[in-house]
Amino acid sequence: MAGDIVPIELGVTRGDLVTLWAPRWREGDDEWEAFLGHEDDLYGFDSVAALAAFIRTNDDNDLVEHPAWPTFSKLAAPELEPEDDHCFDLVGVPDLVAGDPEALTVAELDATLTMVRNVGEVCDLDPVVKFFENHPELGHLRFGADQFTGRDGEKLWDRIGIAVAEDWDAVVDALDAIVTSPAVDADALAGAEAEILAAQENVVDADDDADTDDYDEYDSDSDNEDEDEDGEEETFWTGVGIDPVKIVTAETTLFTLRCYLDDHAVFLGSGGRIAVFASERALARYLADRHDHDLARVSTYETVRNAAVDGSLEVTVTDENVYVLPGLADDLATGPDSVDADQLELAVELFTDAADFAKDDATDAALAPSTPLGWYVSYILEPTPGRMTPNPPFDAEAAAWRTLEQEFETRLRPE
């Protein structure tokens, strides 16, 4: 698929270095993928400022022919800071496989190995290519931590550990051998460092202003107790901080409840399964009779329970809590112009919330910008000037989305 240019961090033997990666893009009938470098060298820099200085003054590297290069090379230095999910610690891989196959560990290991495989294929590194050819068990990582449960799962995780113990040093050595840090223009470096420093100072100033605003808002809240933070009249549900949710699937329409505790989603349900109902009335009846679910630990739930018991509870779903899933996969297969971005954003929210409730990081990993689906979704939801329009076909992305949708539906527990 077509893509932008992405700042990434690679943790190699000499330290954490920043560089650039261009995911696959298409020019005519040809498909390309590249990293910042030239001939046999992969360029890596000790700081974001050095990276910024280099790309502003160098026109002899493998990315200058990328369609986004003219725009990308003019970005402000702070915009070149790699996102957390684009930081790959190669040296730390043995520590990951030495631990338990928890969801976060498996997701991080999969992301790191995927990026290493990209480097190996693009730079034609034989030890890297052979590592993946000789160890097909590594392919199970992309399916998440569930692959490593039970006796067979433990054996599979052990095989991955053995593969890393035996052959990973050769992989790291191969990457170490091609990574180099070209000299950068001193004036350009000083300018980039000044930009980063100014940006950091602006963040501190903004935080100070926010603290002042929060204090002023606290004072004014005493005069607006009947209004929520958007200035709208408070309803029963906003008062208790719990939202009725409507989910439209290909087969039916379902209702449930959700709230957030410490930024984590909590649904009506337990054990990572979400209790869903065919109607608002059925949901209200359940709330009157059953209290053995995770939502019962919310401090305001007793208010909901009492209203359900005395018959006064009305389950009312607002527009921002209506999730319509049918048609999204087909629209994604057709192309970005066919996708309703609002509907897609809501579906992503629902899938990630449900995965959060189940303590499963596989959904976040599948939607990471380093994956074809994640890159495609981010193009639609986070449009930025200069980004290339993805080129078809989008069959793989649509199939990956259908997999996420199916995984979400397995988390639903009809009552």
Image (cartoon, grey):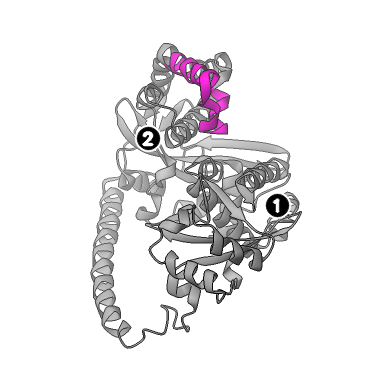
Marks 2/1: CA–CA distance: 35 Å
Q: Compare residues 245 and 325 and report the one nearer the observer.
A: 245
Q: Earlier in the sequence, mark 2 or mark 1?
A: 2
Picture layout, residue 294 above or below residue 306: above
Instruction: Residue lying at the far top in this picture: please name it.
Output: 166
Instruction: Residue lying at the far bottom in this picture: please name it.
Output: 223
Residue 159: x and y in percent read 49, 15
**SS of the residue at dot 2?**
loop
Q: Please tell me whether residue 152 belongs to the stretch shown in magenta.
A: yes
Amino acid on which the number 2 mark rests in the picture = Gly
Judging by the rendered image, the residue that carries numbered circle 1 is 332
Q: Please tell me whether residue 56 belongs to the stretch shown in magenta.
A: no
Judging by the rendered image, the residue that carries numbered circle 2 is 44
- Residue range in magenta is 138-164
Residue 98: x and y in percent read 37, 22
Q: Compare residues 317 and 8 and report the one nearer the observer.
A: 317
